[in-house]
Image (tube, grey):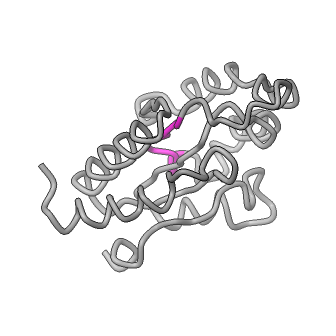
Amino acid sequence: MAPPALEAIAARLAGGFIHRLTPLLGRPARVICPSDEAEQALIVSMTQAADAQGMASEVIDLRPAPAERLDAITARLDGWQSGAANSNDQTAQRLLILLGFDAFGDDTQDAPTYPFRSKFQFDQKFLWLFVGRDASRMRFLFESYRRPLYRAAGDITPDDWKRS
């Protein structure tokens, strides 16, 4: 069980990310968790917030086999052919929490993110939360205009966790 301070931070983070307007305004986000306890508190809070909004959630740990697991996720995406986009259904059908996304934060893991970006950026079936531990690797992925995931997700890491 996470300490109360971590639980409070995670709950505040989840409340800002998942709320009644999420189906209309939900945008992909990334967060850096400073510890196992923070990651667990985040997962619990996010899945509870999603459930409260009637949204299914799924936690996918990429760490055991990052490229293979990201390929499996990419295969599930419709890109421009997203069922939600085609049906005018503005409901985010599922929250996807991708743990260990910082595994891709170097040049050796570049290839798996290219096909993912081309399908992910137009997908409307999922609400995306990218979770990692290494802040520099996450910045490498999402803040460099040379990277395929440049600006693909906003950083919602709380200041309390950035200082950890």
40 to 38, vertically: above or below: above
Residue at horizontal 47%, vertical 29%? 56
Left or right, residue 101 beside residue 48: right
Answer left or right for 140 relative to 130. Answer: right
Quarter of the picture holding the C terminus = bottom left
x and y percent of residue 99 in the render? 44, 42
From the top left corner, tell me how far across and down residue 7 is, in percent: 23, 59
Residue 100 highlighted magenta (yes or no) = yes
Magenta-highlighted residues? 95-103
Q: Residue at x 61, y 20 (%)?
A: 72
Which residue is depicted at the point 41% across and 78% down?
159
Q: 76 or 111, which is in the foreground? A: 76
Image quadrant assignment for residue 100: top left
**At x 52% / y 46%, what residue is drawn?**
101
Q: Nearer the viewer, residue 150 or 120?
A: 120
- In the picture, measured across the screen, residue 139 lies left or right of residue 86, that is left
Q: Nearer the viewer, residue 87 or 40?
A: 87
Image location (x, y in percent) of residue 127:
60, 41
Q: Position of residue 54 (x, y in %)?
A: 47, 34
